Amino acid sequence: MSAENIKCCIIAGGTSGRFGSDKSLHVFNGKPMIQHTYDAVKPVFDEIYIIAPGGEKFSFLDAIIIPDLIPKLGPIGGIYTAVESIEMERAFVFPCDMPFINTDFIRYMTEIPDYYDIVVPELNGRYQPLHAIYSKRCAEGIKRKIDLEDYRMSGFYEGYNIRAVIEDEISFYDDPFKMFKNINFKEDLGE
């Protein structure tokens, strides 16, 4: 698999309730939070999609805005929108609030063979579902879980061919605990 047959989707549709303001636009280290994600993925992907309602606030980025197909479901709704909306066979999904992701590690993940339905980092026995590649084949399973009101991020993984990217692989590129640090509170930024 290479980045040519994968679409990049940044999920930025959350309410930022715990953060207290729109974290996608919160300035961290001199730029909006979403810009950190965008800058990390841009060297790997020609086109970048942002899954978000009211996407005009991201007009400063060279990206295609796609509104959630089913609004207000949280991250699982963003993943569903990504795999259901794109024309490519695979979507590499990223959150807008993980400012330390690593470009070289992203490139490494895109080079993993494409016969997996899901390619996802695993850290301490837990998947990192918001830094993962999903096949369009996952759309049906995600939708089934949504219909059952099961919004757990990895609740739809059962039955799919999964390639877990293990900690030793991740550590080659950066500290995995830093790389997958998800910013939920302003205190998480250490500002």
Image: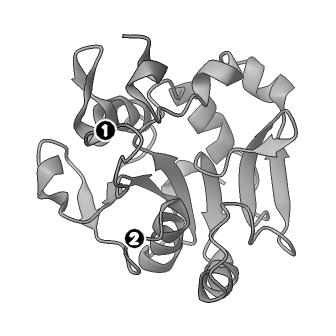
- 72 to 60, vertically: above or below: below
Residue 52 image point, x, y percent: 30, 61
Q: Nearer the viewer, residue 182 or 38?
A: 182
- 157 to 4, vertically: above or below: below
Residue 175 image point, x, y percent: 68, 16
Q: Amino acid at mark 1?
A: Gly
Which residue is depicted at the point 72% across and 49% down? 120
Which residue is depicted at the point 43% across and 73% down? 86
SS state under label 1: loop
Direction from residue 64 to residue 42 in the image, left or right: right
SS state under label 2: loop
Q: Which residue is mark 1?
A: 20
Q: Nearer the viewer, residue 74 or 131?
A: 74
Which residue is depicted at the point 67% across and 81% down? 145
Which quarter of the image is occupied by the C terminus?
top left
Q: Amino acid at mark 2?
A: Lys
Q: Nearer the viewer, residue 162 or 122?
A: 122
Residue 43 image point, x, y percent: 40, 34
Which quarter of the image is occupied by the N terminus?
bottom right
Q: Which residue is mark 2?
A: 72
Colouring used for the render? one colour
State how far apart marks 1 and 2 are (Cα): 17 Å
Select label 1 or label 2 by which is in front.
1
Q: Earlier in the sequence, mark 1 or mark 2?
A: 1
Which residue is depicted at the point 58% across and 36% down? 107
Direction from residue 151 to residue 6 in the image, left or right: left
Direction from residue 41 to residue 125 in the image, left or right: right
Badge 1 crowding class, 10 Å Cα cut-off, few under 14, some 14 to 19, many 20 or more, is few
Badge 2 crowding class, 10 Å Cα cut-off, few under 14, some 14 to 19, many 20 or more, is some
Residue 116 image point, x, y percent: 78, 63
